[in-house]
Image: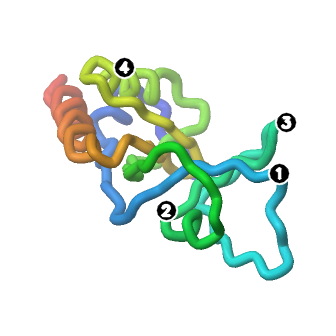
Amino acid sequence: MTGETSLKSLLATMQPSLHEGEYVFCSTPQLASEGCTLDPIGLFKEAEGLTLILPRSQAEAANLPYSAVFAMITLTVHSSLEAVGFLAAIATRLASHGISVNPVSAFYHDHLFVPIAQSEAAMALLQELAQEHSDIG
């Protein structure tokens, strides 16, 4: 099953869903396997260390430092990893309202991490953007 590539269709049908909870980005030299209770929702290996995306409670329980707290919004449309301009349009809309976004693309969906205090505003902007594109014939 391939994902959607049409920018108009992606924007019109993105259907953002705000997850409950608070999420943080942490960095660690490696993920210890013995006795590890961490269950990251995302990780990425960089030269400087392993970046983990975790529920805030897990990071605090493991004494992992973080600098900001985020809400997670999933765009429930099945987007193609080869789609052009989808995240650019979203990032541009959020940036024009002073909202930072850390997007993560996975096989089926794109996930947006926005500052927790701005999550409702981000949701409203995403719904507005979708509505604008669903009205275009």
Q: What residue type is labelled 4?
A: Thr
Whether the residues at callouts 3 and 4 have beta carbons within 8 Å, the answer is no
- Label 1 Cα crowd, 10 Å radius (few <14 / some 14-19 / many 20+): few
Residue at image position (49%, 49%) is 109
| In the image, residue 71 above or below residue 95 | below
Answer left or right for 75 relative to 47: left
The tag on residue 40 is: none
Q: Disc 3 to disc 2, how far (Cα)?
A: 24 Å
Looking at the image, what colour scheme do you see?
Answer: rainbow
Residue at image position (35%, 60%) is 19
- Which mark is nearer the camera, 2 or 4? 2
| In the image, residue 101 above or below residue 64 | above
Q: Which amino acid does label 3 sit on?
A: Ala
Identify the secondary structure beneath mark 2.
helix
The tag on residue 47 is: 3
Residue at image position (47%, 21%) is 85
N-term-proximal mark, 4 vs 1: 1
Task: Between residue 56 and residue 120, name the one nearer to us.
Answer: 56
Q: Mark 1 points at which residue?
A: 29
Residue at image position (47%, 39%) is 4
Residue 118 is situated, as x and y percent measured from the top left of the image, at 27, 41
Q: Mark 2 points at which residue?
A: 56
